[in-house]
Amino acid sequence: YEQLAKQILIVDLDVHQGNGSASIFQNENRVFTFSMHGAHNYPFHKEQSDLDIGLKDGTNDALYLELLQSNLNTLLHQVKPDFVFFLSGVDILETDKFGKLKVTMQGCKRRDEIVFTALKQLGVPCTVAMGGGYSPDVRTIVEAHCNTFRLAKDIYGLN
């Protein structure tokens, strides 16, 4: 138990609410849970995250990215995390069979860029868990996940 982080931020951007994280960390002040998800999507009974943003069906790139940018910037400065867990679900894509949002491939890519750039600028390390993806063409899912890797490589200067 090395106590390398005093404050952790979970940024859950899968289309489903981060109900597991919200429940597990509900009484843990050292972990702040942030979930931006489809309001009318599974799970139908939502847990209480520290910050929940339930999105209307059909939410597009412009609104999604605006809400993410403003809330993430606020949280990073208020929470001051030492470490971030980023859940980058690709079930936010408009092609997703179950997601109900209308985020384009470019919007999904921009989402990841917003998160990685903000964290790099503040020197906050993160780990990424990829999830979701129920588009009919598996190549769409693979491309969206590969975009996350490509952006991390470019932003963090990895070889």
Image (cartoon, rainbow, N blue to C red):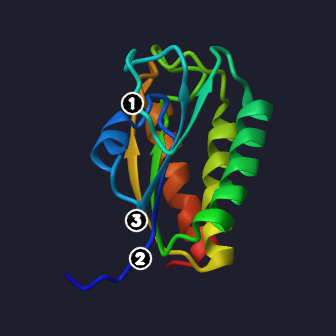
Residue 59 versus residue 144: which sits nearer the camera?
59
Residue type pointed to by label 3: Arg
Mark 2: secondary structure: loop
**Neighbourhood count class around disc 1 (C-alpha, 10 Å): few under 14, some 14–19, many 20 upward:** some
- Total number of numbered discs in the rendering: 3
Q: Quadrant of the N terminus?
A: bottom left
User: Separation of disc 2 and disc 3 at Cα?
Assistant: 6 Å
Label drawn at residue 68: none
Disc 3 element: loop
Apparent side of residue 155 relative to residue 42 in the rendered image (left or right): right
Which label's residue is closer to the chain start, 1 or 2?
2
Q: Which residue is mark 3?
A: 30
Residue 116: image location, x then y, percent = 60, 63
Callout 2 amino acid: Lys
Q: Quarter-wise, where is residue 28 in the image?
A: bottom left
- The residue where tag 2 is placed is 6
Give the label on residue 47, or none.
1
Tell me what residue is drawn at x 41 percent, y 60 percent. Answer: 29
